[in-house]
Amino acid sequence: MRNKKQVVEAYALAKDLYGRIGIDTEKAIERLTQIPISMHCWQGDDVTGFEQTDCQLSGGIQSTGNYSGKAKTPEQLRGDLEKAFTLIPGKKRLNLHAMYLETEGERVDRDEIEPKHFKKWVSWAKGHNIGLDFNPTLFSHDKANDGLTLSHPNKGIRDFWIEHCKRARKISAYFGRALGTPSVMNIWIPDGFKDVPVDRLGPRQRLKDSLDKILEEKMDPAYHLDAIESKLFGIGSESYVVGSHEFYMGYAVKNDTVLCLDAGHFHPTEVISNKISALSLFTNHLLLHVSRPVRWDSDHVVLLDEELREIALEIVRHNLVNRVHIGLDFFDASINRIAAWTIGTRNMMKALLIALLEPTDALIKLEQDFNFTKRLAYLEELKSYPWQAVWDYYCHKNGFPIGLDWMEEVKNYEAEVLAYRCK
Ligand SMILES: C[C@H](O)[C@H](O)[C@@H](O)C(=O)CO
Ligand SMILES: [Mn+2]
């Protein structure tokens, strides 16, 4: 544990060291404060939601683990998020799924959702001065049991999900209007086949047609942005996913929608950091689902690993902060869920800070001079620059826990709140 005096002294040394390579640490901190990170509500309850049904999580995604204390009501989930917000510095948003609606005991099916079912979330978000993002939920429902939704051969099922998505757009725009910041609404569907299909085209034609119908009504981008998320495979869709990367990349470029890149939705050695610059030339906005696949799309809590740092560098180096929306997408039920949010979100922020402390212009100059030896030496040296002292100071200055101090707070919350939730 560091005391405040040590934090301030270490920062003074770091500030001096960064100053010598032309980096103003105060400016970096100021810029970091402006970058929003959309925290996903579903880490708090293992992607369960608050619908009045007992449908199990489906769609080929899985939350594994049995750590006690998961949120079971909207009040509990909001309480847990509030706790996490006190441990995570910076500008936060909340990403909600349609299944987190509140209906006062009434059974409201997915094709019946309305803005009124999210009123409490909106007034809560207002109270915390945060923006909301949204997702229609096209899994964990009996009309998704065939593993197909918007691409289903049955028109009735397609129409049901089209109606759900259209209604979700209205809710998303309601968020944007009420909170004065556009809500990014991301469509992810599980559609695919376990085994090798014969007709790869038909489902894609139907998905394209469904999306065209969903997006038919033009919406004001000041309040609402449409995003679409591709996937390589899922559990039960190992051989074929209708909404592949090529499908959605083509659709997004042609129709000017936001393209969502989930870090766990590509081949094991394929990284999303290397896609950002290329796509920035052909799309106006990207959405990221920052996640961590371990052998499969396992949605582990994100580490401060090389790929996370590369993602942040790509956003900062190319000045894409206003065009790349950073969302998180992990869910680990084997550890304390508030700690999971805290570790993952703080890691995202640390990666952004490291990127903001990079002397990019000097490095580009070396590259343009073909001085690859110095470029490599410099990049390696920067890894051990004292960014952590800047991070600690940033947390301290803004009244957030320094280092591991947040763990004590999670421990107390677990003893005082989570321990009283039945299994
Ligand atoms: C709950 C989310 O919508 C889901 O994780 C989706 O974004 C995804 O990544 C599915 O693999
Ligand atoms: Mn995702």
Image: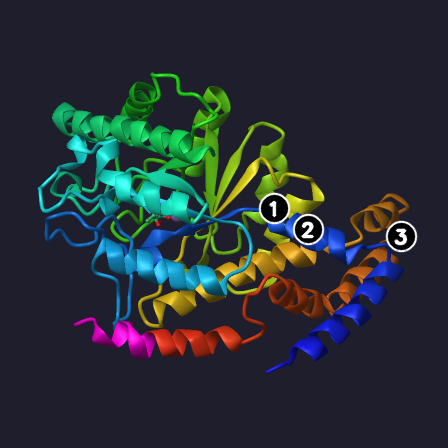
Quadrant in the rendering for residue 396: bottom right
Circle 2 SS class: helix
Q: Residues within 10 Å of mark 1 (few under 14, many from 20)?
A: few
The kind of residue on which mark 3 rests is: Asn
Q: Are marks 3 and 2 in contact (CB under 8 Å)?
A: no
Q: Residue at x 89, y 61 (%)?
A: 20
For label 2, the residue is: 30
Q: Residue at x 85, y 65 (%)?
A: 16
Query: How much space separates mark 3 and mark 1, taking CA atoms?
Result: 34 Å
Q: Are marks 3 and 1 in contact (CB under 8 Å)?
A: no
Q: Residues within 10 Å of mark 2 (few under 14, many from 20)?
A: few
Give the mark toward the camera: 3 or 1. 1
Residue 22 lies in the magenta-colored region: no
Quadrant in the rendering for residue 324: top right
Residue 107 versus residue 63: which sits nearer the camera? 107
Which residue in the rendered view is the most extreme toward the bottom?
1
Residue 420 lies in the magenta-colored region: yes
* Earlier sequence position, callout 3 versus callout 2: 2
Is 176 situated above or below 93?
A: above
The kind of residue on which mark 1 rests is: Gln
In which quadrant is the C terminus drawn?
bottom left
For label 1, the residue is: 34
For label 3, the residue is: 371
